[in-house]
Image (cartoon, grey):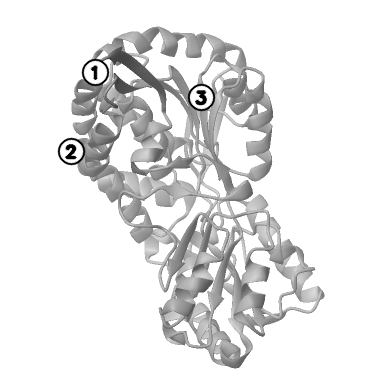
Amino acid sequence: MNTLKSINPVNGEVVGEVPVTPVEEIPAIVARARAAQPAWEALGLEGRVALLRRTGEMFAERLEQNAELMTREMGKPLAEARAEAKRMVAIDHELDEILEALAPELVEDGNTRSTIYRDPLGVVGAITPWNFPMSMPAWMILPALAAGNTVVFKPSEETPLCGQAYADVLIEVLPADVLIVIHGADDQGKAIVQADVDMIAFTGSREVGKHIMREAAGTLKRVMLELGGKDPMIVLDDADLAQAARFAAMNSFRNCGQVCVSTERIFVMDSVADDFEKALAELAGGMQVGDGMEGADVGPMVNAGQRDHVLAQVDAAVSAGARVLAGGSGHHDNFVIPTVLADVTDEMDIATAETFGPVACVTRVASADEAVARANDTPFGLGAVVFGSGDERTNGVARRLTAGMIGVNRPPGGAAGTPWVGARESGIGFHKSKDGHKQFTQTRVLSTSV
């Protein structure tokens, strides 16, 4: 049997392996999921949610086990992995939100009484990334199942053990074939997209997202695509520079920069650039790089290919005139030292193409108008942040940005209950929130005369 080996990016050791799903078996797997869907739907929304609630306690029992698995398989620091594992435990709020979002809604106008139902689509194909190997599956699978769909799930080939560990908890409480895991790489992902599924939920690269849209067009499959970003940060001349530098360091280097809303482009007003650059460089230089199991602040890149991509961007930028303020050397194995570059120009690849690594790029600007124009000069539009005094001017700059989520003196993600949403080529559809959960359903309106 062909197997997929999971490799620890710290030392190259095999963490474990899973059987690769033969591509020719995927249509039959999807057919099993479709056969199981009517009985799963028949349980009703409240019945399905009641079953799913049981997993919170199970995830709590396996929290440390799952956190350590994420660190060994993907490389993120154990503290970050624990925080991700804790999110699997705290599912009651999301399930309550799903109940509210999908409940039938009555609308009357004096002549007609209509009930809006949120029915399942059928079978959802969920294809998830490696950087958040348990929380990203949860974002897709939990609302899809609660809505009454069955799910065929392919975790990333980089983190198959994490994906399987997440699914195993759900499978323990679900009827047979309501959730089926497929393992493999590109061929298996393509086979799911081409199979008889009703929706594809995918998080990954823009290029793969476009391929999925083309393939889905043939039968007009529903798609939900989160496709990354090149997130900007604007630092105005009245910003708290220490606070801004702390955020920039955290959001550029956490998870080794392998975050879809990582801060990759920083536009700083000329008058405060020297002080900001100095503060950011000091923070970067103080970060401990190493094995996430041993308390490091920054772990390894997920694999050698990702490491090479990041270092090639850095080397090309330096060759084109960028200044290294921190890092830039000492890289070894899959470890990239947190790097701060200044004098980054729009002509450099690192200024336009997604980096997905621990590199903060600083560009000086003469005005807020210039900062906004350059921040918006990208096909992406996932997250953005603005640091300033927090007054009308700061909020006004934030409102001019084209990202789906904008933070003012804080990260871009919103309050509980708000969507995780991108603009432009950062995605189609969105996760989280009542509106996000509804995207896993077919809206039907049943009307009678009053």
Which numbered disc flags the more N-terminal residue, 3 or 1?
A: 1
**In the rendered view, would you say 261 is above or below 222?**
below
Closer to us: mark 1 or mark 2? 1
**In the rendered view, would you say 393 is above or below 354?**
below
Residue 250 lies left or right of residue 60; in this view the side is right
* Image quarter of the N terminus: top right
For badge 3, the amino acid type reads Met
Task: Please tell me which residue is depicted at 51% across the width and 56% down the height of the picture.
Answer: 259
Cα–Cα span, label 3 and label 1: 20 Å
Task: Please tell me which residue is depicted at 27% across the width and 12% down the height of the picture.
Answer: 42
Q: Mark number for residue 398?
A: none
Which numbered disc flags the more N-terminal residue, 2 or 3?
A: 2
Q: Which residue is mark 3?
A: 199
Q: Nearer the viewer, residue 64 or 352?
A: 352
Q: Secondary structure at mark 3?
A: strand
Q: Mark number for residue 57?
A: 2
Cα–Cα span, label 1 and label 2: 22 Å
Q: Residues within 10 Å of mark 1 (few under 14, many from 20)?
A: few
Q: Residues within 10 Å of mark 3 (few under 14, many from 20)?
A: many
Q: Secondary structure at mark 1?
A: helix
Q: Which residue is mark 1?
A: 44
Instruction: Mark 3 and mark 1 in contact? Answer it, CB < 8 Å.
Output: no
